[in-house]
Image: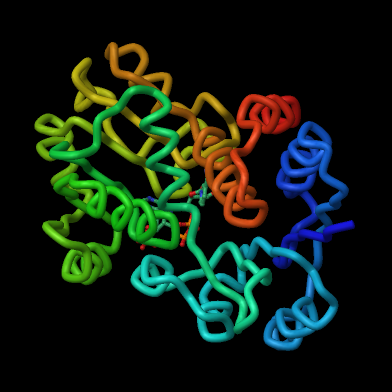
Amino acid sequence: MDVYGLLGNPVGHSLSPPMHEAAYDDCGLEARYVTFEPDEGDIEDAIHGADALGIAGLNVTIPFKQAALEIVAPEDLATRIGAVNTIDFSGSGPPTGYNTDAVGALRALRDHDVGIDGARAVVVGAGGAGRAIAFGLADAGARVAIANRTEATAHALAEEVPRASGHGLAELEGLVANADVLVNATSVGMEEDATPVPADALHEELAVLDAVYRPLETRLLADAADAGATTVDGAWMLLYQGVEAFEIWTGRDAPVDVMNEALRARL
Ligand code: NAP
């Protein structure tokens, strides 16, 4: 029996256990996915303990993503993003740390036939999700404009991301008017009827990914659909970060449809 899990605090409402266990069942894998809530000061012991116990893989979420980077051997992308959300214990050396949020966002967009290479992308938000998505889009060939409420954070991130520019939210309308791809990586719209982007700025040439997945149809996505834009809800990103973790851990293609169904049944 292989044991996988999620390290975070709190993790009570996580959708990862049903999503991953549906994949194990579908693939006939003898495996379980469980949640762990260590105290904040115990993260290093928790990761080393998991390694010693033979746990096969861990996802990592708030508040441990940044600290995990210092404890495992991170991949280059995770180092640049500054956060690890997936740990693989299968190698003989120290556990390897990945950030699958970036790939999750890219695969969510590609699943909806959104081209990234050469695209003009706007990422609203420069926190954990914004960092991952900005690096992911830039690595895939997009020119990324990062707009953030705290403008200095957008400028600082733009210094790190190739071909990126940093902006305040006041510039959003102009940026979006000339964009092919728009991603909301703020928490605006989460369990509230609010949007970070004025509806007037949206247009039919745009593909809009909202990282927020509660509700599935945010105000931003409803406005984007009204404008004739392509819409991608946050559950697609959540799905594909899990798909990517499953594939890292097991070395096989994930049953994407099965995982998607298990996830959406709970949203
Ligand atoms: P975070 O690190 O706390 O960053 C929050 C971001 O939202 C910051 O850029 C912050 O701007 C901005 N923000 C917060 N309140 C705002 C407001 N009222 N107006 C404008 N901007 C505001 O959080 P995170 O981890 O990046 O998560 C952001 C969202 O993405 C959450 O809703 C989370 O659930 C979602 N998410 C989804 C996935 C997925 O797989 N679908 C994965 C990761 C995260 P300041 O810098 O100015 O504070």
**Lateral position of residue 14 relative to residue 84, left or right:** right
**Lateral position of residue 117 relative to residue 7, left or right:** left
Q: Nearer the viewer, residue 22 or 154?
A: 22
Q: How is the image coloured?
A: rainbow
Tell me the quarter of the image containing the N terminus.
bottom right
**Lateral position of residue 106 relative to residue 160, left or right:** right
Residue at left offset 60%, top offset 52%? 245
Q: Quadrant of residue 139?
A: bottom left
Residue at left offset 72%, top offset 67%? 7
- As displayed, is residue 138 above or below residue 27? below
Tell me the quarter of the image containing the C terminus.
top right
In the rendered image, residue 104, in percent from the top left (x then y), is placed at 47, 45
Q: Nearer the viewer, residue 138 or 166?
A: 138
Question: How many numbered marks have been drawn onto this rendered protein structure?
Answer: 0
Image region (quadrant) for ligand 1: bottom left
In the rendered image, residue 190, in percent from the top left (x then y), is placed at 54, 41
Q: Quadrant of residue 225?
A: top left
In the rendered image, residue 85, in percent from the top left (x then y), is placed at 56, 63
Residue at left offset 48%, top offset 52%? 101
Residue at left offset 21%, top offset 41%? 121
In the rendered image, residue 150, in percent from the top left (x then y), is placed at 28, 63
**Lateral position of residue 173 relative to residue 78, left or right:** left
- As displayed, is residue 170 above or below residue 197? below
